[in-house]
Image (cartoon, rainbow, N blue to C red):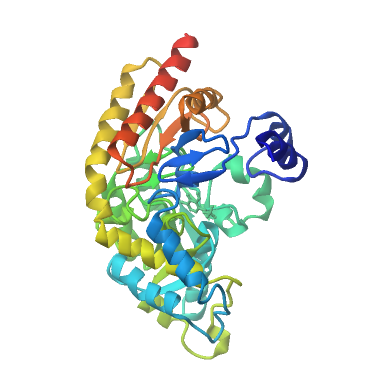
Amino acid sequence: MTDDDLIALDRAHVWRPYTSSEDHQGRSLFVVDRAEGPWLIGADGRRVLDASGSWWCNNLGHGHPRLRDAIRRQSERLMHCTFAAATHEPAARLAAELIEAAPAGLNRVFYSDNGSTAVEVALKIAFQYWQQDGQPGRQRFLALPGAYHGDTLGAMSAGAVDEFSAVFRPLLFDVARPAEPAGDDWTPVFDALFHSLDEAGDGVAAVIVEPIVQGAAGMRMYPAPLLAELRRKVDEVGALLIADEVFTGFGRTGPMWACEHADVTPDLLCTAKGLSGGMLPFAATLATERIYDGFRGDKSRALMHGHTFCGNPLGAAVAREVLSIYRDDDVLASAAPKAAKVKTAIESMSEIPGVAHPRALGMCAAFEVGVPGYMGKIGWEISDLALELGAHLRPLGNTIYIVPPLNIDAEELDQLLQIVRVSTERVLRSGQ
Ligand SMILES: Cc1ncc(COP(=O)(O)O)c(C=O)c1O
């Protein structure tokens, strides 16, 4: 089949995520035939750099030979089986290894399939914990403005990116959150959050945050001391802290977990995306032993939540291999010089008239090219040009960002940074 045939089939039968039916019929589609390392490759051999990490999950590049091998080996033994009153080596060993890699104090692993479910599980655990542990009045959740925690109803309730959730507002539960920051000053936002925490006090079940970097809000970054202060305030009122590390985990911002920037251990930590090296749908919610203990007792105290594929052996096997690659290749340390290069390159973009607020943390960098927001069009013009030049950018409206694999080769990284610069410069200059 030719690419045109495939696009015609897609347009005829697929319902695309985040795409209006109108756009589906009109916007061009890149047909990916295969992928390796940071490259997406078309059937005609055309190679483009996957700058958005295939939805922010491809931390070790596509088709990593060790990950492929782990999946193949596991597929020959056990691809799936119930996780009800049964266990298997990949899930049991992964739980122990994940705990070893997690911030100290997290001791239990609940498996699910994707970032949204990891968040749903965290919210449900937090809620039920208080219901059956003597403080049923703790029912409120607090969150940050601009938060994004996934597209299921609970995760959307915790989130606040209107483009995703406004239409569903009547279906969502109420989550308190401060107003948007004015510019880049997050201190008043956290002060307002602390004030709400004090006010709601023993009515608060948990505060949920994306630690340090808010991805879908436009790769917004806030200072680590504010997260450390939040941990203290949450403790003061006796509530729980949920860290949604779905995007920031697995070294995306430098350390293994963004919480480490603030030396914070959350009570619940959500991980997905990089957990499976972006290879398979696989997720986990980590909890402290204290929370797990809150579910002891008779059957009525169980967390009545589970998914057909939770703990899936293929996903668990690939996640074990991911952790082992991080250890063997010292992925975090070897990414550090590349992160420094990304920071310098992105910060130098401020020389281009029209580029605003360049920022970078670890292997995550972004800048604005117009009024921020999802509906911005300049970002898409830049992404169209970048595709011609050899990079697949997926802007968040007028926010251009890159999240390349942590193990990207230095030359390929240079190439990506060059394409980002040239495409941005050309589009912004042509608009002047
Ligand atoms: C911080 C955060 N939480 C949750 C999710 C949802 O993950 P998924 O798309 O796997 O459901 C995302 C996805 O981008 C995310 O960035």
Q: Nearer the viewer, residue 180 or 149?
A: 149
User: Residue 371's spot in the image, x, y percent?
Assistant: 49, 24
User: Residue 341's spot in the image, x, y percent?
Assistant: 25, 34
Asked whether, in this view, residue 199 is left or right of residue 362, the answer is: right
Q: Residue furthest bottom?
A: 298
Q: How many marks?
A: 0
Residue pictured at 43% horizontal, 63% vertical? 69
In this view, 72 is above or below 297: above
Q: Residue furthest right?
A: 12
Q: Nearer the viewer, residue 293 or 5?
A: 5
In this view, 161 is above or below 239: above
Residue pictured at 40% horizontal, 45% vertical? 37
Camera sees residue 13: yes
Quarter occupied by the N terminus: top right
User: Residue 285's spot in the image, x, y percent?
Assistant: 45, 67
Residue pictured at 40% horizontal, 27% vertical? 420
Camera sees residue 243: no
Q: Nearer the viewer, residue 158 or 192?
A: 158
User: Residue 11's spot in the image, x, y percent?
Assistant: 73, 38
In this view, 59 is above or below 345: below
